[in-house]
Image: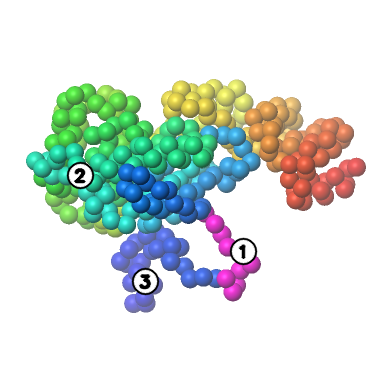
Amino acid sequence: MSAIFKKIRKFGFISFLFLNLLFIPSLAGDCDKTVDIGCKTTLYSRIFDEERFLQIHLPEFYQGSENVYPVIYVNMGELFFTQVSAVADFLSMNDRMPECIVVGIEVPNPGEDLAIPRWRNRDGTERINLYQKFLAEELIPYINENYRTAGYNILYGYSIGSAFALYTLLKVGDTFDAYIASSPNFYWRDSTLLKLADSTFRAGTPNDKKLFFCIGGRERADWIKSQEDFIGILSEFNPQRLVWDRTVYPDDEHMETPLLSIYDGLKFIFSGWKIFPEGNGIDLTLYKAHYDSLRLNYGYPVKIPENLLNTLGFTLLQQKQLDKALEVFTFCINNYPKSFNAYDSYGLALLIKGDTLSAIINYEKSLKLNPENVGAIEMLKKIR
Protein backbone atom coordinates (compact mmCIF):
# COMPACT_ATOMS: atom_id res chain seq x y z
CA MET A 1 0.00 0.00 0.00
CA SER A 2 1.42 3.42 -0.96
CA ALA A 3 2.25 6.04 1.67
CA ILE A 4 -0.58 8.27 0.44
CA PHE A 5 -3.18 5.53 0.81
CA LYS A 6 -1.85 4.67 4.25
CA LYS A 7 -2.43 8.30 5.28
CA ILE A 8 -5.94 8.30 3.83
CA ARG A 9 -6.72 5.05 5.66
CA LYS A 10 -5.38 6.45 8.93
CA PHE A 11 -6.91 9.91 8.88
CA GLY A 12 -9.85 9.68 6.49
CA PHE A 13 -9.90 11.51 3.16
CA ILE A 14 -11.12 14.91 4.41
CA SER A 15 -8.67 15.00 7.31
CA PHE A 16 -5.89 13.86 4.95
CA LEU A 17 -6.77 16.70 2.58
CA PHE A 18 -6.58 19.35 5.27
CA LEU A 19 -3.41 17.93 6.79
CA ASN A 20 -1.75 18.31 3.41
CA LEU A 21 -3.14 21.84 2.99
CA LEU A 22 -1.69 22.79 6.35
CA PHE A 23 1.73 21.29 5.72
CA ILE A 24 2.11 21.78 1.96
CA PRO A 25 5.73 22.61 1.08
CA SER A 26 6.67 26.03 -0.21
CA LEU A 27 5.98 26.52 -3.90
CA ALA A 28 7.78 29.83 -4.13
CA GLY A 29 9.82 28.63 -7.08
CA ASP A 30 6.70 27.80 -9.08
CA CYS A 31 4.31 30.60 -8.13
CA ASP A 32 4.38 34.34 -8.59
CA LYS A 33 2.20 35.09 -5.55
CA THR A 34 1.28 33.46 -2.27
CA VAL A 35 -2.29 32.90 -1.11
CA ASP A 36 -3.15 34.47 2.24
CA ILE A 37 -6.15 33.49 4.36
CA GLY A 38 -5.38 35.82 7.24
CA CYS A 39 -2.77 37.52 9.37
CA LYS A 40 -0.90 36.77 12.57
CA THR A 41 -0.67 39.24 15.39
CA THR A 42 -0.11 39.40 19.14
CA LEU A 43 -2.11 40.81 22.02
CA TYR A 44 -0.43 41.60 25.30
CA SER A 45 -2.46 40.17 28.17
CA ARG A 46 -2.25 41.91 31.52
CA ILE A 47 -4.08 38.95 33.02
CA PHE A 48 -1.32 36.53 31.98
CA ASP A 49 1.46 39.14 31.76
CA GLU A 50 2.51 37.76 28.37
CA GLU A 51 1.91 38.08 24.65
CA ARG A 52 -0.87 35.89 23.27
CA PHE A 53 -0.61 34.92 19.60
CA LEU A 54 -3.64 35.31 17.31
CA GLN A 55 -4.59 34.48 13.73
CA ILE A 56 -7.30 36.62 12.11
CA HIS A 57 -9.28 35.89 8.95
CA LEU A 58 -11.52 38.56 7.40
CA PRO A 59 -14.28 38.13 4.81
CA GLU A 60 -13.11 38.57 1.23
CA PHE A 61 -14.68 42.00 0.68
CA TYR A 62 -14.30 43.27 4.26
CA GLN A 63 -12.19 46.26 3.22
CA GLY A 64 -14.69 47.46 0.63
CA SER A 65 -17.82 47.26 2.77
CA GLU A 66 -19.31 48.79 5.87
CA ASN A 67 -20.94 45.58 7.09
CA VAL A 68 -20.60 44.18 10.59
CA TYR A 69 -19.75 40.51 11.08
CA PRO A 70 -20.19 37.73 13.64
CA VAL A 71 -16.94 36.42 15.10
CA ILE A 72 -15.88 32.79 15.47
CA TYR A 73 -13.27 32.30 18.21
CA VAL A 74 -11.19 29.16 17.71
CA ASN A 75 -9.36 27.58 20.61
CA MET A 76 -6.05 25.98 19.61
CA GLY A 77 -6.08 28.14 16.51
CA GLU A 78 -2.66 26.80 15.52
CA LEU A 79 -4.50 23.57 14.63
CA PHE A 80 -7.99 24.62 13.54
CA PHE A 81 -7.86 28.21 12.26
CA THR A 82 -7.42 27.08 8.64
CA GLN A 83 -10.32 24.62 8.75
CA VAL A 84 -12.77 27.02 10.39
CA SER A 85 -11.88 29.83 8.00
CA ALA A 86 -12.29 27.61 4.93
CA VAL A 87 -15.62 26.13 6.06
CA ALA A 88 -17.04 29.52 7.07
CA ASP A 89 -16.11 30.97 3.68
CA PHE A 90 -17.60 27.99 1.85
CA LEU A 91 -20.91 28.09 3.73
CA SER A 92 -21.26 31.87 3.41
CA MET A 93 -20.48 31.65 -0.31
CA ASN A 94 -23.49 29.34 -0.56
CA ASP A 95 -25.66 31.64 1.59
CA ARG A 96 -25.88 29.06 4.41
CA MET A 97 -24.48 31.51 6.93
CA PRO A 98 -23.22 35.11 7.07
CA GLU A 99 -19.65 36.01 6.32
CA CYS A 100 -17.67 35.91 9.57
CA ILE A 101 -14.46 37.10 11.13
CA VAL A 102 -12.44 34.13 12.40
CA VAL A 103 -10.02 34.55 15.33
CA GLY A 104 -7.62 31.69 16.01
CA ILE A 105 -6.22 31.70 19.54
CA GLU A 106 -2.94 29.89 19.88
CA VAL A 107 -2.85 27.91 23.13
CA PRO A 108 0.70 26.66 23.75
CA ASN A 109 -0.29 24.93 27.01
CA PRO A 110 -3.86 23.63 26.56
CA GLY A 111 -3.40 21.29 29.52
CA GLU A 112 -3.16 24.41 31.70
CA ASP A 113 -5.35 27.05 30.02
CA LEU A 114 -8.20 24.78 28.94
CA ALA A 115 -8.27 22.10 31.64
CA ILE A 116 -11.50 22.15 33.63
CA PRO A 117 -11.17 21.67 37.42
CA ARG A 118 -12.22 18.59 39.33
CA TRP A 119 -15.66 19.15 40.84
CA ARG A 120 -14.59 18.57 44.45
CA ASN A 121 -11.42 20.67 44.19
CA ARG A 122 -12.61 23.77 42.35
CA ASP A 123 -11.99 27.00 44.23
CA GLY A 124 -12.05 29.67 41.50
CA THR A 125 -8.28 30.07 41.32
CA GLU A 126 -7.71 27.63 38.46
CA ARG A 127 -5.87 28.87 35.36
CA ILE A 128 -8.98 28.13 33.26
CA ASN A 129 -10.69 31.02 35.05
CA LEU A 130 -7.88 33.33 33.99
CA TYR A 131 -8.26 32.15 30.40
CA GLN A 132 -12.02 32.79 30.51
CA LYS A 133 -11.30 36.24 31.92
CA PHE A 134 -8.76 36.85 29.15
CA LEU A 135 -11.37 36.05 26.50
CA ALA A 136 -14.13 38.17 28.05
CA GLU A 137 -12.12 41.17 29.25
CA GLU A 138 -9.21 41.41 26.83
CA LEU A 139 -9.56 39.46 23.59
CA ILE A 140 -13.21 40.13 22.68
CA PRO A 141 -12.94 43.88 23.52
CA TYR A 142 -9.75 44.05 21.42
CA ILE A 143 -11.47 42.44 18.41
CA ASN A 144 -14.54 44.65 18.84
CA GLU A 145 -12.39 47.76 18.98
CA ASN A 146 -10.30 46.96 15.91
CA TYR A 147 -12.82 45.27 13.60
CA ARG A 148 -16.44 45.78 12.54
CA THR A 149 -18.08 43.14 14.70
CA ALA A 150 -21.78 42.36 15.02
CA GLY A 151 -21.79 41.43 18.70
CA TYR A 152 -22.63 37.79 17.89
CA ASN A 153 -19.82 35.52 19.08
CA ILE A 154 -19.23 31.79 18.55
CA LEU A 155 -16.71 29.61 20.42
CA TYR A 156 -15.21 26.47 18.86
CA GLY A 157 -13.30 23.80 20.75
CA TYR A 158 -12.06 20.26 20.12
CA SER A 159 -11.36 17.56 22.72
CA ILE A 160 -9.91 19.41 25.73
CA GLY A 161 -11.02 22.62 24.00
CA SER A 162 -14.57 21.28 23.72
CA ALA A 163 -14.65 20.66 27.47
CA PHE A 164 -13.53 24.26 27.95
CA ALA A 165 -16.29 25.49 25.63
CA LEU A 166 -18.95 23.57 27.57
CA TYR A 167 -17.52 24.69 30.92
CA THR A 168 -17.68 28.29 29.70
CA LEU A 169 -21.29 27.86 28.53
CA LEU A 170 -22.38 26.30 31.82
CA LYS A 171 -20.34 28.45 34.21
CA VAL A 172 -20.14 31.88 32.58
CA GLY A 173 -22.91 31.77 29.96
CA ASP A 174 -22.92 35.32 28.64
CA THR A 175 -19.52 35.53 26.95
CA PHE A 176 -20.60 33.75 23.74
CA ASP A 177 -23.87 33.31 21.88
CA ALA A 178 -23.19 29.88 20.38
CA TYR A 179 -20.82 26.97 21.00
CA ILE A 180 -19.41 24.10 18.92
CA ALA A 181 -17.91 21.31 21.03
CA SER A 182 -16.17 18.55 19.07
CA SER A 183 -15.82 15.21 20.91
CA PRO A 184 -16.19 16.29 24.55
CA ASN A 185 -15.88 13.73 27.36
CA PHE A 186 -18.39 14.60 30.09
CA TYR A 187 -16.83 12.11 32.55
CA TRP A 188 -13.50 13.96 32.59
CA ARG A 189 -12.29 15.36 35.91
CA ASP A 190 -14.84 13.70 38.22
CA SER A 191 -17.69 14.33 35.73
CA THR A 192 -17.42 18.06 36.42
CA LEU A 193 -19.39 18.96 33.26
CA LEU A 194 -22.32 16.71 34.20
CA LYS A 195 -22.47 18.07 37.74
CA LEU A 196 -22.17 21.64 36.53
CA ALA A 197 -24.90 21.03 33.91
CA ASP A 198 -27.23 19.71 36.60
CA SER A 199 -26.77 22.76 38.83
CA THR A 200 -26.87 25.23 35.93
CA PHE A 201 -30.05 23.86 34.35
CA ARG A 202 -31.65 23.64 37.78
CA ALA A 203 -31.10 27.39 38.10
CA GLY A 204 -32.79 28.02 34.74
CA THR A 205 -29.70 29.12 32.83
CA PRO A 206 -28.11 29.63 30.31
CA ASN A 207 -30.44 31.80 28.26
CA ASP A 208 -30.71 32.33 24.49
CA LYS A 209 -27.70 30.18 23.57
CA LYS A 210 -27.02 27.57 20.90
CA LEU A 211 -24.94 24.43 21.41
CA PHE A 212 -23.75 21.83 18.92
CA PHE A 213 -21.70 18.86 20.09
CA CYS A 214 -20.66 15.58 18.52
CA ILE A 215 -18.84 12.29 18.94
CA GLY A 216 -17.29 9.75 16.61
CA GLY A 217 -18.85 6.31 16.60
CA ARG A 218 -15.38 4.75 16.88
CA GLU A 219 -14.39 6.81 19.91
CA ARG A 220 -14.14 5.32 23.40
CA ALA A 221 -17.35 3.75 24.66
CA ASP A 222 -17.23 5.66 27.96
CA TRP A 223 -16.95 8.99 26.08
CA ILE A 224 -20.02 8.09 24.05
CA LYS A 225 -21.87 7.05 27.22
CA SER A 226 -20.89 10.34 28.91
CA GLN A 227 -22.64 12.28 26.14
CA GLU A 228 -25.76 10.16 26.56
CA ASP A 229 -25.73 11.06 30.26
CA PHE A 230 -25.53 14.75 29.34
CA ILE A 231 -28.45 14.33 26.96
CA GLY A 232 -30.34 12.73 29.85
CA ILE A 233 -29.77 15.87 31.94
CA LEU A 234 -30.88 18.04 29.03
CA SER A 235 -34.04 15.95 28.68
CA GLU A 236 -34.75 16.09 32.41
CA PHE A 237 -34.55 19.86 32.72
CA ASN A 238 -35.41 20.75 29.11
CA PRO A 239 -33.84 24.24 29.21
CA GLN A 240 -36.24 26.23 27.03
CA ARG A 241 -33.78 28.91 26.02
CA LEU A 242 -30.92 26.61 25.09
CA VAL A 243 -31.19 25.35 21.51
CA TRP A 244 -28.97 22.31 21.05
CA ASP A 245 -28.16 19.47 18.71
CA ARG A 246 -25.83 16.48 18.83
CA THR A 247 -24.47 14.35 15.98
CA VAL A 248 -22.79 10.95 16.04
CA TYR A 249 -20.43 10.23 13.14
CA PRO A 250 -20.68 6.41 13.05
CA ASP A 251 -17.47 5.58 11.20
CA ASP A 252 -15.18 8.28 12.58
CA GLU A 253 -12.53 8.34 15.26
CA HIS A 254 -11.54 11.08 17.68
CA MET A 255 -9.11 12.79 15.30
CA GLU A 256 -11.66 12.86 12.48
CA THR A 257 -14.50 14.84 14.09
CA PRO A 258 -13.18 18.44 14.00
CA LEU A 259 -13.80 19.26 10.34
CA LEU A 260 -17.16 17.47 10.32
CA SER A 261 -18.31 19.29 13.46
CA ILE A 262 -17.21 22.68 12.17
CA TYR A 263 -19.34 22.23 9.05
CA ASP A 264 -22.38 20.77 10.79
CA GLY A 265 -22.07 23.06 13.80
CA LEU A 266 -22.05 26.26 11.75
CA LYS A 267 -24.98 25.02 9.65
CA PHE A 268 -26.88 24.30 12.88
CA ILE A 269 -26.13 27.68 14.45
CA PHE A 270 -27.28 29.44 11.29
CA SER A 271 -30.08 27.04 10.36
CA GLY A 272 -32.75 28.87 8.40
CA TRP A 273 -30.26 31.42 7.10
CA LYS A 274 -30.69 30.55 3.45
CA ILE A 275 -33.96 31.48 1.78
CA PHE A 276 -35.62 28.97 -0.54
CA PRO A 277 -38.39 30.89 -2.35
CA GLU A 278 -41.31 28.82 -3.56
CA GLY A 279 -41.79 28.68 -7.32
CA ASN A 280 -39.42 29.99 -9.96
CA GLY A 281 -40.04 33.71 -9.58
CA ILE A 282 -37.65 36.14 -7.85
CA ASP A 283 -39.37 38.63 -5.57
CA LEU A 284 -37.04 41.14 -3.91
CA THR A 285 -39.70 41.83 -1.26
CA LEU A 286 -39.45 38.24 0.01
CA TYR A 287 -35.68 38.52 0.36
CA LYS A 288 -36.00 41.79 2.26
CA ALA A 289 -38.51 40.24 4.67
CA HIS A 290 -36.33 37.15 5.19
CA TYR A 291 -33.22 39.14 6.07
CA ASP A 292 -35.25 41.39 8.36
CA SER A 293 -36.30 38.24 10.25
CA LEU A 294 -32.65 37.20 10.55
CA ARG A 295 -31.90 40.57 12.11
CA LEU A 296 -34.50 39.89 14.78
CA ASN A 297 -33.29 36.33 15.40
CA TYR A 298 -29.57 37.12 15.66
CA GLY A 299 -29.74 40.60 17.15
CA TYR A 300 -27.66 42.58 14.67
CA PRO A 301 -28.32 44.33 11.33
CA VAL A 302 -28.23 41.74 8.53
CA LYS A 303 -28.09 42.92 4.92
CA ILE A 304 -28.80 40.84 1.85
CA PRO A 305 -25.29 39.83 0.68
CA GLU A 306 -23.95 41.70 -2.32
CA ASN A 307 -23.04 38.50 -4.16
CA LEU A 308 -26.61 37.19 -3.70
CA LEU A 309 -28.11 40.42 -5.05
CA ASN A 310 -25.76 40.25 -8.01
CA THR A 311 -26.79 36.66 -8.70
CA LEU A 312 -30.48 37.55 -8.47
CA GLY A 313 -30.02 40.48 -10.84
CA PHE A 314 -28.26 38.44 -13.51
CA THR A 315 -30.78 35.63 -13.16
CA LEU A 316 -33.53 38.14 -13.88
CA LEU A 317 -31.59 39.43 -16.89
CA GLN A 318 -31.36 35.87 -18.23
CA GLN A 319 -35.11 35.54 -17.70
CA LYS A 320 -35.57 38.79 -19.67
CA GLN A 321 -37.18 40.52 -16.66
CA LEU A 322 -35.27 43.75 -17.16
CA ASP A 323 -37.33 46.00 -14.86
CA LYS A 324 -36.98 43.59 -11.93
CA ALA A 325 -33.25 43.24 -12.62
CA LEU A 326 -32.83 47.03 -12.55
CA GLU A 327 -34.72 47.13 -9.24
CA VAL A 328 -32.34 44.57 -7.73
CA PHE A 329 -29.19 46.29 -9.01
CA THR A 330 -30.43 49.67 -7.75
CA PHE A 331 -31.12 48.14 -4.33
CA CYS A 332 -27.60 46.65 -4.38
CA ILE A 333 -26.00 50.04 -5.08
CA ASN A 334 -28.00 51.67 -2.29
CA ASN A 335 -26.79 49.01 0.16
CA TYR A 336 -23.22 48.74 -1.14
CA PRO A 337 -22.32 52.23 -2.41
CA LYS A 338 -18.58 51.49 -2.22
CA SER A 339 -18.76 48.37 -4.39
CA PHE A 340 -17.26 48.76 -7.85
CA ASN A 341 -18.97 45.54 -8.90
CA ALA A 342 -22.43 46.87 -8.00
CA TYR A 343 -22.01 49.82 -10.41
CA ASP A 344 -20.51 47.53 -13.06
CA SER A 345 -23.53 45.20 -12.97
CA TYR A 346 -25.99 48.10 -12.97
CA GLY A 347 -24.16 49.61 -15.95
CA LEU A 348 -24.65 46.41 -17.96
CA ALA A 349 -28.36 46.32 -17.14
CA LEU A 350 -28.73 49.93 -18.23
CA LEU A 351 -26.90 49.16 -21.46
CA ILE A 352 -29.32 46.31 -22.16
CA LYS A 353 -32.15 48.74 -21.53
CA GLY A 354 -30.68 51.07 -24.14
CA ASP A 355 -29.73 53.86 -21.72
CA THR A 356 -26.12 54.21 -22.88
CA LEU A 357 -25.49 57.55 -21.15
CA SER A 358 -26.50 56.20 -17.72
CA ALA A 359 -24.51 53.04 -18.40
CA ILE A 360 -21.38 55.12 -19.06
CA ILE A 361 -21.90 57.06 -15.83
CA ASN A 362 -22.10 53.83 -13.79
CA TYR A 363 -19.10 52.22 -15.49
CA GLU A 364 -17.12 55.38 -14.70
CA LYS A 365 -18.23 55.18 -11.05
CA SER A 366 -17.08 51.56 -11.01
CA LEU A 367 -13.67 52.55 -12.40
CA LYS A 368 -13.31 55.33 -9.85
CA LEU A 369 -13.79 52.76 -7.08
CA ASN A 370 -11.52 50.23 -8.78
CA PRO A 371 -9.23 51.62 -11.51
CA GLU A 372 -8.14 48.04 -12.33
CA ASN A 373 -11.64 46.89 -13.33
CA VAL A 374 -10.69 45.61 -16.78
CA GLY A 375 -14.29 44.78 -17.69
CA ALA A 376 -15.40 48.37 -17.20
CA ILE A 377 -12.38 49.69 -19.13
CA GLU A 378 -13.15 47.48 -22.12
CA MET A 379 -16.86 48.25 -22.02
CA LEU A 380 -16.28 52.00 -21.97
CA LYS A 381 -14.03 51.68 -25.04
CA LYS A 382 -16.92 50.07 -26.89
CA ILE A 383 -19.80 52.35 -25.91
CA ARG A 384 -18.29 55.82 -25.66
3D distance between C-alphas at marks 1 and 3: 31 Å
Which of the labelled discs sits on residue 126, or is there none?
Answer: 2
Front disc: 1 or 3: 1
Which of the labelled discs sits on residue 33, or is there none?
Answer: 1
Would residue 113 be found to the left or right of residue 67 on screen?
A: left
3D distance between C-alphas at marks 1 and 2: 46 Å
Mark 2 or mark 3, which is nearer the start of the sequence? 3
Seen in the picture, residue 173 relative to 86 is either above or below; the reply is above
What residue lies at 46% left-to-right and 40% top-to-bottom?
143
| Res 231 seen here | yes
Q: Residues within 10 Å of mark 1 (few under 14, many from 20)?
A: few
What residue lies at 18% left-to-right and 38% top-to-bottom?
124
Q: Residues within 10 Å of mark 3 (few under 14, many from 20)?
A: few
Mark 2 or mark 1, which is nearer the start of the sequence? 1
Residue 231 in the image, given as x and y percentages of width and height: 19, 36
Name the residue furthest left: 120
Mark 3 or mark 1, which is nearer the start of the sequence? 3
Seen in the picture, residue 231 relative to 44 is either above or below; the reply is above
Asked whether residue 30 is drawn in magenta, I would say: yes
For mark 3, give the secondary structure.
helix
Helix, strand or loop: magenta stretch: loop
Q: Indicate the quadrant containing the C terminus: top left, top right, bottom left or bottom right.
A: top right
For mark 2, give the secondary structure.
loop
Q: Indicate the quadrant containing the N terminus: top left, top right, bottom left or bottom right.
A: bottom left
The amino acid pointed to by label 3 is Phe
Q: Which residue is mark 3?
A: 5
Residue 71 in the image, given as x and y percentages of width and height: 44, 39
In the rendered structure, which segment of residues is drawn in magenta?
28-37
The amino acid pointed to by label 2 is Glu
3D distance between C-alphas at marks 3 and 2: 44 Å
Q: Residues within 10 Å of mark 2 (few under 14, many from 20)?
A: some
Residue 80 in the image, given as x and y percentages of width and height: 38, 54
